[in-house]
Image (cartoon, helix red, strand yellow):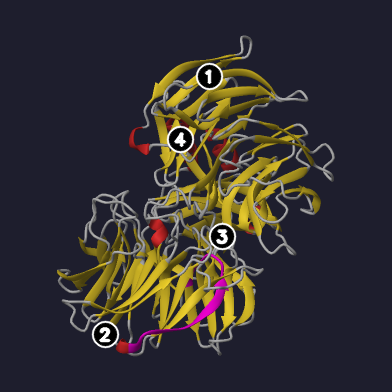
Amino acid sequence: MKPKHFFFCLILFIQTVKAQDSLRFLSATTGAGCYRVEYYNNFLFAGTGTTLRVYDASGNPPFQMLYEYRFRSIILDLKIKNNFLYVAANHDGISKWDITSPSTPTKLYNYVPDSLNEAAYHISFYGDTIFVAYFKKVGVFYDNGNSFQKLSTFGHITGNGYIAGGDLKNNVYAYTVGRNGYTGAAPDGVYFRNAQTFAPVSFYQQTFAAPEGVIFGKNTSLIHVLGGTQNTYNPFDARGLFYSLDISNINSPQVAFSDTITDVVMGLAVASPQNAVNINDTIYVATNAALETGWTILSPAYGQVYAYDATTISNVNLLTNIYAGLWHFDAEVHNQNMYVASEWYGIKTLNISNIYNEVDLGNTLTGGWAMKGDKFGNTMVLANEGYGIKKFDITNPFQPILTGTATFVSDTIGFCQNVKFSGNGNYIYGLFQTVYQFRIYDKNTLSLVGKIPNIGGVSYGNTDMQVWGNKIFFNGNTGGNDSIQVMDVTNPASPFLVSKLPLKENDMKISDNGKLFICNNEGIFVYDVTTGTPSLLASHLFSGIQDGKKIAVINDTIFAYVTWKGLVRYIYNSTLNTITESTTVSLGSLGTPQAMAVDQFGLYIGYTKFGLYAYNKQTMTQKSWYRTGLDLKGYTDIWPLTDLYCKDNLIFLNEYFGQTSILTMDNSVVTTIENSTSSDSSPELIIYPNPSNGNFVLQQLKTVDKKSLQNGNIEIYDVYGQKVFQSQINSTKYEIHLDLPGGIYFYKFKDKEKIKGTGKIILQ
């Protein structure tokens, strides 16, 4: 393709993109609390939310991070076989990585699930055959060294049932089925199949709790069941279950041992055995947050890893409880060290040379879980469990850069629920669920400026906060969202509570002209907050059992999700102070959203399980869809989409496990970034042919400085912001050969570390 033809095609391509009018993923922050951890040759491979990370574990913690790669969905399992890493990443499916050089893994190939209803949870091996526990079925694949070849599926679960985990030994594949508290699905328990024919062999029904996973004994005919937690069925009973089945007669599994694990403190410690590691038939069980019976809560907080001696079928017994990171999900043991995948502590490393007297060697923080966030200028902040507050430079929305954290040092845990910038952007306000519950930080240094202790009512995952001038409005949540508290932050060093609005709220937004919009069980309300005392301007009351759950506001247009009604557009008349219902549409089976936001390009409705939907604001018809990261056994309440907001033509989507994704519906944002150059004298670059099968030519068209291209280098990134190619340039016409999966990639040409040209390439 000749250069001039390339530019003509590029113009057509950009025009086509603009006509699509769709949600586009730009980038995302990386790292989260640790969910999975695997050891390999002095390296730790960690699944931290949507990010795969590699750490050097040859020394003492905190370990140095060497590599990271962001998936679009949650990493739920890691398995290492020989010098290969296998990753199950939810709806990204399964992928295989060459880890001959552990610090620089190479992705070889992957298999994306066949349908939107599939989510890869767990991987088991049977020679070169791979069994993958999906959300609703088990998939069987042959790893032929060049790709995954699908062989069969079985165990198709209907209704609200799900498959949580599996394991393989000899000729038997075992997998667990749970119902998440619902009826109408296959019974809970452990299902056994022939690993060659996939035919059913037997079944053991579990009647207490909802099973998570299974792990076979090494030298015994036992299989150990991670029985999950009773709070799946009953929120007032968070006990867990671990038990062992004797399968010497596979047709009739018999219980050899059972242990009900106490939660001790209702609502604090959920005893949910989820994953385990078998070291010579000592079974180390990660129990999420189970506390030892009679144990006094310490600071820092710990849960327990339970160690069981399972060397003898007739005498399985509990050896001890090992202090581990609170809210932990996985454990790995190598030699004398245990590595625990933890929400708040990242990777907690323990020396267990004396199993009855473990030594805490320290933590390797991996990111914490994402709550709510905000943006001001080129800075984004994120409320976070574990880190407190995280600050990012998003000057380039394609590559967010973590620039600081405000973690409690003396207060042990930075359990931040909500974060907002001050009106002038000089300060960051944080609502915390731990210790001092409202804090003010300097935006640049993240140093503590002021605080209000014991404000009360900072509710987990449900604390709204809005800012107008020197006033902050947040829902009290004491007694069930029964008030909106008002704080005065005129002097950031001495903030204080001013008053309360005796009004319940389910969601609230504030407009640029100082109008506070609130929806609750009774209706929609508009307050003027520009004066000293908030005053009610208008209200629209619901009828019957309708309930306003979520709200989004742009100018004088209000969008609300109302139960028993649907998505409703209201018009607020600021002259008459009236609210008039305009248009109503049904969202069907999608139900109540987790979050809503709006900008000039569309209305956005977010769900943990179903994804992000963009609607036309006028016609209320769907325009676009983006799949969010979590498909985990139907959980939409305890691990939800935590925030959705629009700023400066960008859309920010916060996911508890997945951190912050940055999207846009504004095509000019994309084209401006992709075609920007640092100065008029920069070389005019083209890459052609584009699209290509992997062979591109990078050419400099301007003749002002022929050496400019020769003295630079080209970097290519995938849509996750991961660098996938880099090369020095030694000619004004340079050939690039890319052996990468098909898709969209972004290039940057650098000359002496200065970005001189950027753009997009497409591999077919």
Say which of marks 2 and 4 sits in front: 2
Camera-nearest residue between 391 and 705: 391
Q: CA distance from mark 3 to mark 2?
A: 39 Å
Which residue type does callout 1 highlight?
A: His
Above or below residue 94? Residue 545 is: above
The answer to whether residue 369 is seen in the rendering is yes
Q: Assign a secondary structure to mark 3.
A: loop
* Residue drawn at x 55%, y 59% as measured from the top left: 32
Q: CA distance from mark 1 to mark 2?
A: 66 Å
Whether residues under marks 1 and 3 lie with C-beta atoms below 8 angstroms apart, the answer is no
Label whose residue precedes the other's in the sequence (3 or 4): 4
Which residue type does callout 4 highlight?
A: Val
Say which of marks 3 and 4 sits in front: 3
Which residue type does callout 2 highlight?
A: Ser
Q: Which residue, given by chain and number where applicable, does mark 3 sit on?
A: 31
**Residue 430, magenta (yes or no):** no
Say which of marks 1 and 3 sits in front: 1
Q: CA distance from mark 3 to mark 4?
A: 30 Å
Bounds of the magenta segment: 315-330
Which residue type does callout 3 highlight?
A: Gly
Camera-nearest residue between 693 and 497: 497
Label whose residue precedes the other's in the sequence (1 or 3): 3
Camera-nearest residue between 497 and 37: 497
* Residue drawn at x 43%, y 44% as measured from the top left: 1
